[in-house]
Amino acid sequence: MVREKVLYLCIVCLVFQISVHAQLSDKEGGDGYDNYASEVLQNMTLSDKVALLLLPSQNDYYTFSPEKLPYSQNLLLSNQWLINGIEGFATGEVDVPFPDIRAISHLEDEATLEILRNDLLHFAAQEGYKAVVASNHYLFSGTGINYIDEPKDDRDFTLWFLGNQREDNLPVFEMPADLFSKNIPLRKISFNSGSSQSVQPWVLHQDKKKPENFEDLLSYGGVFLADNPEREHARILRAFQSNMLQEDDLNRACERLLTKINEAGIRLPDVNRIPEGVRMFARRRTFEEGLHYFSEHREPFFPANLSTINIELIADVEDQKAEAFAQMVDFHLPNFETSSQPGDYLLWLFDGENLTDSILADRMSEIRQGHPNSGIALFLADAGSYFQNHPLPYGIDALFTGSSDWPLVWEYLGQAAFSGVPLKKSVRREECFSGVRHLSRELPKTRLKIGIPEEVALHRDSLNKIDELIAEAIQTKATPGAQVLIARDGIVVWNKSYGYHTYQKKYPVKTNDIYDLASVTKVTATVPSLMKLYEEQAWALKDSLGRFFVESDTTEKSGITIKDLLLHESGLPSFIPFYLNTIDKDRLNGNVFGRRYSWKYNIKLDNYIYLNRTVSYRRDVFHSKADSVFSIPVAENMFMNTGYLDSIMHQVLEAPMRTRHNYLYSDLGFYFLGQLIPKLSGHSLNYFSRMHFYNPIGMYNTSFLPSMVFSRNKIVPTEDDRAFRKQLLDGWVHDPGAAMMGGVAGHAGLFSNSLDLAKLMQLYLNGGTYGGKRYLEDSVLEMFTGTYNDENRRGLGFDKPQPDTTKVSPASYYASPASFGHSGFTGTLVWADPETRLIYIFLSNRIHPNQYNKKLIEENYRTRLQDIAYRAIISSSREE
């Protein structure tokens, strides 16, 4: 019986909607509005009329379903003509939701407001929406738009009719919580007390006072906002049925609303079409403007040095929102959830819908019991008006708030916790924060932020060409996979992973996977460590090797200066294949190399270079098990005699010299520089760079000797080394010399991912600061990244663009002369440009499975991808 009744009501409702549609479609222009409203009104039941004047405050009610009575009786909802602007709304064609009224109220930039206006109007025209319920000022106040009249009274909210040529808005009032709940006359119930606290007006007009009771509001022509429309519909309907309210007042209100519904509607040609990326930018920026930070302390919640903190996350929110937040935390502090110890900093995510004194106090007591000494930050994407009359909860050290409960807001809150976005003070008009406004703090952005290309004037369609070029590189087997990152103005706008670890396609590349950086180690480990020690006056550019390496005193190398080594002007050879000097000649059958492939020379090292299959290595140098003598790990189950380290450095000192002060790229100079760090600091290069740079700025996916730190499926393998270590190098440095140095060397050995490297490169572009802490002096960075003579393009350790256009450059043709970076043999490139504020990171394992695969180099994929980033700069004067 109940089922049949519901079905009957749905059919009646559907017939009613069809008749209204027909009547609406027959009306054009401004004639006949009153007749139309009267005709429709005659066909409406009392229940229909009550439903028409009730607008739900929550988005859940704005998706029409015939079963949703009484909403199916409301023309605005059943025909999907009404947009809920209070909480914001999803638009489908853009991933970012349209912002809520609270976020919009913070905007002072007219350009962004204009974009949002056109965005809203175009969406409404395209989807057939006629009205939006929002705040009084919203996007139309003071704009001079001829079809928008600004409200002149003291109302709670406004129902804006879009495209109307007449007076085009109606007041919207919140339903009082105590309506019909007491045995008192209706006129005695004030609308200014006991109202719902789930939504609040943000800007109120003071020109007129609104009526203070339900009957007057009804006569006034208003509609009503309800948290629980089912309950309110039933209560008001009973009041009319029992003659507590007069149906004449209801008829006048419905007639006024029906007239405006009939008048409303936007034609697409009247609205400017805004590009999708620009709309996304305006929406995201609006949500960002709605973030706030409250604390007794004026400093950020986290210290500048992230190596001293241990974070724990407690999420009393939906999984999707918790994941959005955690993803941003992991960006700033990778692997933060791996610790088994209680966090000394606790991030508590709480659902604003459950924000009551008792629930908050009980949950806080539970948390404090398990974390008595932790600093606690409370995160609320939407606190409603709770803090209008409440102070900062006891035991809370910091409060982060947003404007609405969208997952995107939780992403921003995760970034805000680490100063990845700027935070402004709460302003006086935000009455919802009256109880905590004195604790509102303004904090600058000091760390990288995750954003979109439009935020930094990069053209999205241009950047999309990266996908095409990477696909080509993978298809032609230039590399099995890669990571590409682009950042500008401290905002990461492109961070993608492509392909797989190997051509077997077992593990897709992820953004937190790490690559062997090869020579990029020079500018991400050795050079920053040397700059730090230079500031401490531990060495000078004119210092010679003889000062620090006494074993060089009897050689011609003793006069080489540190500056010579950094500029690659020392005269040292490019490299020495140390492992070949450990071949067991007694067991070798024939020569070491052959120029043609044969049964004996069957291990290809390069074009026309084949290694003898009978090559084996001296047993007094390498062993399959570690002990006190063979203690240097070179690869899986392969350990080197510790005493052979002296032999390596002896071979460098005995190497034949070329002409000094002439440029010749040399890894051997960085063998000395890597060894210089422990001589000056008392700590290994691995320890020094980690403690002074990586851990403090959150580079927890960066390390030497990665197989001892990370799981193997996180490390992208390089070559299937058939010549030396006879295994796939998975978690072991590819460079043989660095491997024989124990995996930690000044020229190679570091592993990292694109996000971590971007943090260090941003530190360089910031002039030595990151996260509010200074790590290097600006003057020292300027000295190291500058050039020193016309014959050598390089800086001190850093590579620079090739000024001679007839020669191959390590970077894009568009890179400025001030830019700097370095490439790596394994297929890597990092580059920073102070003029364009652009960072470009490319990581790959192009040497898998063989190092003689040179397609990545021959096709210039690294620099061609960088070209795309430069060409994407909007309003650039550079040629396409």
Image: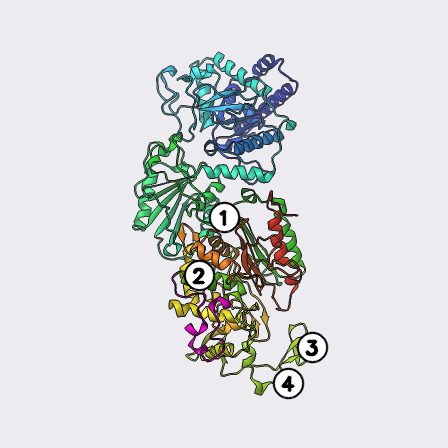
Distance CA(mark 1)–CA(mark 4): 58 Å
Where is residue 706? Give x, y as percent. 48, 65
Where is residue 325? Give x, y as percent. 45, 46
The prevailing secondary structure element of the residues shown in magenta is: loop
- Closest to the observer: 2 or 555? 555
Instruction: Please tell me which of labels 1 and 4 falls first in the chain.
Output: 1
Instruction: Please tell me which of labels 3 and 2 falls first in the chain.
Output: 2
Q: Residue at x 59, y 70 (%)?
A: 720
The stretch of residues the image draws in magenta is 536-565
Picture disc at residue 490: 1
Q: Residue at x 65, y 48 (%)?
A: 879
Provide the residue designation for mark 2.
531
Q: Is residue 404 above or below residue 599?
A: above
Instruction: Please tell me which of labels 4 and 3 falls first in the chain.
Output: 4
- Under circle 4, the secondary element is loop
Q: Is residue 347 highlighted in magenta?
A: no
Picture disc at residue 534: none
Q: Is residue 104 left or right of residue 876?
A: left
What is the crowding at mark 2: few (fewer than 14 residues within 10 Å), some, or many (at least 20)? many
Q: Nearer the viewer, mark 2 or mark 4?
A: 2
Q: Nearer the viewer, mark 3 or mark 1?
A: 1
- Under circle 3, the secondary element is loop
Instruction: Please tell me which of labels 2 and 4 falls first in the chain.
Output: 2
Q: Amino acid at mark 1?
A: Gly
